[in-house]
Every structure is written in C-alpha cells, then in structure tokens.
Image (tube, grey):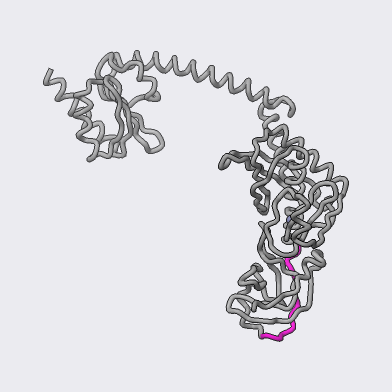
C-alpha cells in the first residue's frame, strides 16, 4: 500500500512552513506524514524548498506516494521530526499562473465560445491552445475582459463534490478523475475540475497581457504574460516603440507609418542601386579580362550572361560565390573540378552560379586554364 501524506497545501495554500514526520526514506527523496509541498501535476511544477535545512529540488507523485526529491535523504530516518519550508516566491508565482490560465480559458469559453485543448505554465509566460481560430482583435478583447475580472477581485474557491454531481454540472472540460472531484470556481469567470493550487482572489494575479499566437496542429496556441511578467512585458514593448520612434523621429503613435515610409524608400533605393550596378557591370565586362574578381554583387552580372564568355567571383565573409557566363560544354568541363575543389552550383546556359570552398587562387587558376584551353581550341 502506498504511504499516505496529508495534503495540507489544499486546506491552506498560503501556508509556507509546517512540522511533519518522516514516513519513508528513499535514495532520492522522502515521504512525510503531511506536507505543504505541492507535487508536480495538472500542468503545475512540483514545489521546491527546504526540509530541516536540506534542499528539496522538486516534489512528485510516484506510485501513489508524494515524494520530496532531495539528494540529502540519507540524513533522515523514518520517525524523524522535520520542519518544512516551501520556496514561496516560486509557488506563489505558479498559483498566479494557474489562476490566470483558468481566467483566460474560462472567459474565452463563456464569452467567445473558444474551447481550450491544452495549456502550458511557463516561468515567464503561459500558453493556452484553442480549437477554434481567433484573431488578435478578439484576443485583445479577451485580455480586456480578463483584466476587468481581475479588477473586480473575484473570489477563487474550491470544494469537493461527488463524481456524479461534477459530471451533471456540464463543466467546460470533461471530468478526468475517478471518485470525488475537486471543483475550482472563480466567481463569474470559471468553474472547472482542477487539482492545482490557486490564489484566493483574482486581484492577486495583478495583470494579464496577450502576447501573440501561432498555428499548431490545426489549433491556435496563444501566448500570455501574467502578474509581474505582464508588467515587464508591457514596459519592454513600450520601450521598443519609444526607441523606434526616436530613431525614426516619429511620435510613438506614428511609428508604423514612419517605418513603412522608410521601407518604401529602402525598396526604391535598392531598385535604383540594382539598375546602376547592372549598367556598371555591363560596361565592366566590355573592358575586363574574362576571369575576374567582381567589384559588385554577382547578381549585377546576370543580365550580361550570354553577351560574352566570362567568369566572375566574389569573396565575402570567407565565402566565395561565382558566376559563369558560357556554354553548357564549358560548364560541364568546369564541373569536373567540383569535387576536388569543393565547388557547388548549377544553372542553365548561358548562366551558371554557385559557391566554392577552395581558395580564391585555386579557383582562379583552374578557370583561367579552362578559358585558355577554350580559346586555343577556337
Ligand atoms: Zn487550476
């Protein structure tokens, strides 16, 4: 029979210290007669803290027992009296996260008919996955609604009912446990079966901020920040907008418009630069040797391909790129050196392009020989 531990964290989730007795000692942890350490489950991480000054890294449910994981278990014996101290900042943060997650999923369900299929509680953010597609404007509306409910300081309570009663209530998520069911209610926001720990007032969550979405497995995964992290997230975003505004010499509410104007200018300048480079490249190949180092980006020579036979290379950040203008036969001969000189690339006559991992001198020498041979054949 698994050893039973009284779950004091349910009767008082705010209790951080407790006296208990050791029931069993395992190589990696302890089982106690009662505990304030919540074991990992329901998307909530297990508690850490101290047992009589010895660090507990996490708490897990194993074989029906609550095991407090610690490397210092050999210091204890069954029957020892111990003092528990839970890592409260971590636990309180998770209680806020858990409550925030209920508020997001509950209000999404009652106000926008969004069904939640998965959640994840992270340190900095939490994710809620919805079945139905939803756009950002709807999720901002949901964010406002959640924060209104937080301001109303709705009470968070829990009670245990029979399995039949829980099933008959038509909860937004089906009951997954057998036997008595622990129900968690947030006044006008949510009612659900849940074994996690929550704050007692929605006001303790402080703030919830929507932070984007992505498509996943045909669902929508939405990202949220909560409590202090929501405030930090909002500060960071404001800082980005203000700095961008300063760089663009634009007021914060006109940053997007100013950025669009700059991007349009960049686009026009790039087009102009391309035309100038192409014209310069066209003049350049008229007077340069057939094998040369290019002073321009190689794309400038693409339009010249076929006008005459030439080979251009350009070395940038330690990588050699090349462009060959010539016949398929010439390229076929060039290709015989690919493996030895670690050259790659391809194309269709008269334009071939690629990269090389050999030295610039090796490449130049091979191509110059090839061109000389070609010339003497003509
Ligand atoms: Zn919960």
The one of 59 and 170 positioned closer to us in this rendering: 170
Position in image of residue 330 (x %, y %): 20, 24
Which quadrant would the C terminus be assigned to in this image?
top left
- Taking the image in four quarters, ligand 1 sits in the one at bottom right
* Residue 89, visible in the rendered structure: no
Position in image of residue 129 (x %, y %): 65, 44
Residue farthest to the left? 377
Instruction: Locate residue 339 relative to residue 87 in the image: left or right.
Output: left
| Residue at 73% from the left image edge and 39% from the top image edge | 113
| Residue at 64% from the left image edge and 68% from the top image edge | 60
Q: In which quarter of the image is residue 376?
A: top left
Q: Taking 195 as reference, is 231 above or below it?
A: above
| Residue at 68% from the left image edge and 45% from the top image edge | 116
Q: Taking 200 as reference, is 104 above or below it?
A: above
* Residue 161, visible in the rendered structure: yes
Q: Give the range drawn in magenta.
A: 78-89
Instruction: Locate residue 98 relative to residue 267 in the image: left or right.
Output: right
Q: Does the magenta stretch include residue 88?
A: yes
Instruction: Locate residue 259 relative to residue 270 in the image: left or right.
Output: right
| Residue at 62% from the left image edge and 76% from the top image edge | 29
Q: Quadrant of residue 252?
A: top right
Q: Is residue 228 magenta?
A: no
Q: In which quarter of the image is residue 224?
A: top right
Position in image of residue 267 (x %, y %): 54, 20
């Amino acid at each position: 029979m698994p050893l039973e531990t009284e779950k004091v964290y349910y009767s008082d989730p705010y209790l951080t210290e407790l006296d208990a007795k050791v029931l069993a000692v395992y190589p990696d942890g302890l089982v106690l007669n009662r505990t304030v350490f919540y074991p990992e489950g329901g998307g909530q991480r297990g508690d850490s803290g101290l047992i009589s000054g010895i660090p507990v890294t996490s708490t897990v449910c194993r074989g029906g027992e609550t095991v407090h994981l610690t490397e210092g278990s050999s210091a204890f014996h069954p029957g020892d009296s111990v003092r528990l101290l839970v890592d409260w900042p971590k636990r309180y943060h998770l209680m806020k996260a858990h409550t925030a997650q209920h508020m997001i999923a509950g209000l999404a369900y009652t106000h926008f008919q969004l069904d939640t299929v998965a959640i994840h509680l992270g340190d900095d953010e939490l994710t809620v996955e919805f079945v139905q597609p939803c756009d950002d404007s709807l999720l901002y509306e949901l964010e406002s609604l959640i924060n209104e409910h937080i301001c109303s300081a709705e009470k968070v309570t829990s009670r245990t009912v029979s399995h039949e009663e829980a099933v008959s209530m038509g909860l937004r998520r089906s009951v997954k446990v057998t036997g008595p069911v622990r129900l968690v209610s947030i006044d006008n926001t949510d009612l659900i079966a849940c074994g996690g720990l929550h704050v007692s007032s929605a006001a303790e969550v402080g703030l919830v901020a929507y932070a984007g979405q992505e498509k996943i497995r045909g669902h929508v995964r939405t990202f949220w920040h909560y409590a202090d992290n929501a405030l930090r997230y909002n500060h960071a975003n404001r800082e980005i907008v203000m700095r961008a505004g300063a760089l663009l010499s634009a007021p914060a509410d006109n940053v997007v418009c100013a950025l669009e104007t700059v991007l349009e200018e960049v686009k026009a300048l790039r087009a102009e630069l391309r035309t100038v480079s192409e014209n310069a490249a066209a003049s350049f190949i008229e007077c340069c040797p057939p094998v040369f180092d290019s002073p321009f980006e190689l794309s400038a020579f693409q339009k010249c391909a076929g006008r005459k036979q030439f080979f251009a290379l350009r070395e940038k950040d330690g990588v050699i790129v090349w462009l060959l203008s010539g016949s398929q036969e010439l390229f076929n001969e060039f290709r015989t050196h690919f493996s030895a000189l670690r050259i790659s690339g391809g194309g269709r006559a008269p334009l071939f392009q690629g990269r090389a991992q050999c030295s610039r001198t090796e490449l130049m020498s091979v191509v110059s020989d090839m061109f000389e041979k070609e010339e003497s054949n003509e």
